[in-house]
Every structure is written in structure tokens, then in C-alpha cells.
Amino acid sequence: MRISVAIDGPAGAGKSTIAKLVGEKYNLMYINTGAMYRAVALEATENNLSPEKVDEICNLISSMEMHFEDDDLILNGENIQEKITMPRISSIVSGYASIPEVRSILVKLQRDMSSKFDVIMDGRDIGTVVLKDAKFKFFLTASPEERAERRFKELQERNLECLYEQILQDIIDRDYKDTHRAFDPLKKADDAVEIDSTNLDINGVVNTICEFIEKLK
Ligand code: DC
């Protein structure tokens, strides 16, 4: 039987860093579902499609071949990881991620991946929708200030101009949109283990998750 690990939580909680490390330890393919929503936002804006153009966006997705290589998203043969993590995409992506038709298509793609590979998948609806039957589910949180601080440092390291206050506001806005949207909002699955990483370093979180996996195996 395939192994699936689900990690959900708000923006900037450290899901991708943690998922990569746990994935390496257990030899799981890391699927960053946020990157797939970002890719849709990128392609849609490059084709001048605002979120109201649902049919056109769905057609566009059918021409998008997405897979992961070394944790990066490859779209139609191009590594778009750098492009999709730009602040411009962060600020518009929730408009596309809240379209039910877009979510249905991406959820199907994500389930297909989990049926072919042992995966660790992170996102907002993994434990509640995409991998409802996963044996290992985690819900990672941290205070908005701590998450903004982490994003700020990460952007500074990439020499991208940014303001802490603006990042904090963006995180607060995204939390609101992600938890209040009508379709598959961000929420902890009843059977997920909640981990608050505000005062934990990366190793602390990875160890906590690995301990649970060992216990539940
Ligand atoms: O995790 P992230 O910040 O890269 O996610 C980008 C956006 O996609 C964010 O607005 C939340 C949304 N998202 C979602 O709705 N469902 C997922 N499974 C993953 C991300």
C-alpha cells in the first residue's frame, strides 16, 4: 500500500521546509500543492485571464503539464519555481485558488500523483479533502508575526525588496481568505496532529513529526 503524509497549515508556517526534510528521511515524493495553484495564477495572468474567466482558466489548465523534479515545479518542461514564489504571485493566487472548478481539477491531479508514488503533500485541504484517508496528517501553525518574520528573511536572502509590515498584512489577508472561502477552506482535519512551530526550530518540528510517524507506523 502507498504511504501518504498530509501537511496542512497557513502561509509561512514552514510546511514546505518541513515536508522536504521528512520526505527525504522516508523517501517520499514531495508535492507542493500551493505551487500548483501558483502556476495556475501565473499562467492565467500571463494570458490576461482574471479569476472570473472560469471556463478559459479551466481550458488553460488542461494544457498545463505539471510535475515535480527535486521539489521544484516543472510546467510544460520549464522550471517555474523562481517565478511562482515572487510576491506578485503571492498577492493574487488566492483569487484563483478559491475557484471551485480549478480546485476540482487540481485535486484530481494531486490524487493521481498520490496513487502513483509514496508522497508527502502540503497545502490547505490535504488532510480534509485531497488525502482524506491518509494515515499521517499534520496541521502546522505559527503566529502571524513569526510567519511574516520568516518570509521577510527569506525574501531578503533572495535580495528581493520587501517591507515586513506589508508581508505581515499579506499573511493576515491570506489567512482570512484561505479560512473563509466557501469551497474547501483551510481547517484542521479532526484526525490531524496539530504542531505550533512558533517556538520550535526546524529540527524540533521534523523530530516531532517523525516521532508521530514512528508511533503510528
Ligand atoms: O502554500 P502557498 O502559499 O504556496 O499557497 C498558495 C495559495 O494557494 C494560497 O492562497 C493557498 C492556496 N492553496 C490552496 O487553496 N490549497 C492548497 N492545497 C494549497 C494552496
Image (cartoon, rainbow, N blue to C red):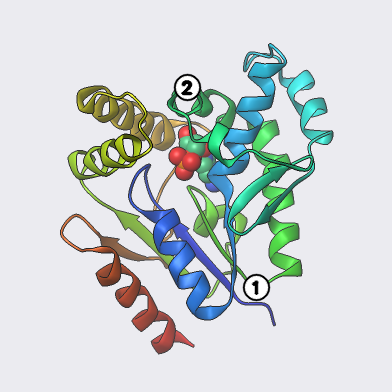
The residue closer to the viewer here, 85 or 179, is 85
Quick one: which residue is furthest to the left in this view?
199
- Quick one: 200 or 158, which is closer to the camera? 158
Q: Quadrant of residue 172?
A: top left
The answer to whether 123 is drawn above or below residue 149 in the figure is: below
Residue 45, position as x, y percentages in the image:
64, 17
At x 82% / y 26%, what residue is drawn? 59
Q: Is residue 140 above or below residue 5?
A: above
Mark 1 to mark 2 CA distance (whole Å): 32 Å
User: Eyeballing the image, is 65 above or below 39?
Assistant: below
Callout 2 environment at 10 Å: few (<14), some (14 to 19), or many (20+)?
few
- Residue 18 position within the rendered picture, expressed as x and y whole percent measured from the top left: 40, 62
**Quarter of the image where the N terminus is located:** bottom right
Label 1 Cα neighbours within 10 Å, binned few <14 / some 14-19 / many ≥20? some
1 or 2: mark nearer the eye: 2
Q: Is residue 48 visible?
A: yes
For the residue pair 164 and 34, the one nearer the viewer reads as 164
* Three-letter amino acid code at the position of disc 1: Asp
Checking the image for residue 118, the label placed there is 1
**Taking 196 as reference, is 86 left or right?**
right
Q: Residue at x 20, y 63 (%)?
A: 200
Q: Which mark is residue 88?
A: 2
